[in-house]
Image (cartoon, rainbow, N blue to C red):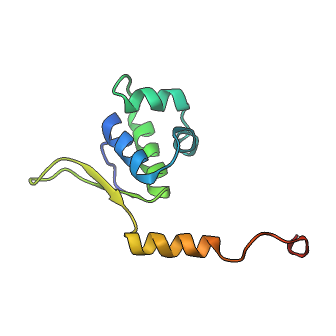
Amino acid sequence: MATEFHIDGFVARAARALSQVSIALVANRAGMDADRLKHYERGLGSVTQEEAQALVKAFSYYGVVFIPEDDDGGVGVRRKFGQTKVEMIENWEGEGGPVGEDDI
């Protein structure tokens, strides 16, 4: 996402729930401390604009799309891929079976 997007702690929490990724993974990807992200998601702390944009990039990496506020409603999140695409990706990831000795 090239443009800046305002993300508050509650939107971050929704994005993480939607992506089904742990606080530790998102925080690591965004270059943040996991405890700080946890507090931010609960509305108990703040982040800098740079950290907020790093979170947007991290969530985008994990398949979250941010919907900007407009006349019809506030900010939101949704999956980058529809359910059919998610199922196809999960099937692709499961192909090939276990790694054999001759694969190394």
Kindly tell me whether residue 30 is visible in this rendering: yes
Residue 87 x, y percent position in the rendering: 47, 72
Residue 43's place in the image compared with 76, above or below, is: above
Residue 64's place in the image compared with 104, above or below, is: above
Residue 60 x, y percent position in the rendering: 44, 56
Name the residue located 50 percent from the left edge and 76 percent from the top edge. Answer: 88
Give the residue furthest to the top.
44
> Quadrant of the image for the N terminus?
bottom left
Name the residue located 71 percent from the left edge and 77 percent from the top edge. Answer: 96
Q: Which of the two residues, 54 or 12, is positioned nearer the viewer here?
A: 12
Give the residue furthest to the front.
97
Q: Which of the two residues, 28 or 4, is positioned nearer the viewer here?
A: 28
Kindly tell me whether residue 8 is visible in this rendering: no
Q: Is residue 72 left or right of residue 101?
A: left
Name the residue located 14 percent from the left edge and 53 percent from the top edge. Answer: 70
> Quadrant of the image for the C terminus?
bottom right
Residue 78's place in the image compared with 96, above or below, is: above
Residue 51 x, y percent position in the rendering: 45, 37
Q: Which of the two residues, 70 or 93, is positioned nearer the viewer here?
A: 93
**Total number of numbered discs in the rendering:** 0
Q: Is residue 93 left or right of residue 39?
A: right
Give the residue furthest to the right.
101
- Where on the picture, by quarter, is residue 3? bottom left
Name the residue located 90 percent from the left edge and 75 percent from the top edge. Answer: 102
Q: Is residue 25 left or right of residue 47?
A: right
- Where on the picture, by quarter, is residue 83? bottom left
